[in-house]
Image (cartoon, rainbow, N blue to C red):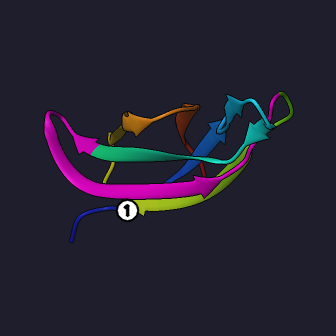
Amino acid sequence: MQASQRYTLNIQDLFISSSEGLCGAEVVVAILDGDTEVDRLSFKGKVGPGGDGYSRSYSGKPDLKAAVVAGVGRITFTEIRP
């Protein structure tokens, strides 16, 4: 049985600027095992500007990475140490 690792995915600056002000946007995040995509997550809404962002937990195998594949915003993907 393979060990499971917990992660925190944090999204910041998920918004667009329009003539009507700041509006919600969408970001698509790929979860990667090396160069292989193992999962894809989509988030819609408005986060920011500024602040701590929106965090969500994720479980998977050890040593996964995350990358934005479409949309706006910034992400961090951090392993949660026991």
Q: Nearer the viewer, residue 12 or 63?
A: 12
Most distant residue in the front direction? 19
Quadrant position of residue 4? bottom left
Quadrant position of residue 38? bottom left
Most distant residue in the right direction? 51
Q: Which residue is mark 1?
A: 4
Q: Is residue 5 visible?
A: no
Q: Position of residue 72 (x, y in %)?
A: 52, 32
Q: Quadrant of the N terminus?
A: bottom left
Q: Assess whether residue 48 is covered by the magenta stretch.
A: yes
Q: What's under tag 1, amino acid-wise?
A: Ser
Q: Position of residue 82 (x, y in %)?
A: 60, 52
Q: Nearer the viewer, residue 14 or 79?
A: 14
What span is in magenta?
32-49
Q: Residue at x 62, y 41 (%)?
A: 11
Lateral position of residue 59 relative to residue 31, left or right? right
Q: Position of residue 56 (x, y in %)?
A: 62, 57
Instruction: Label 1, secondary structure: give it.
Output: loop
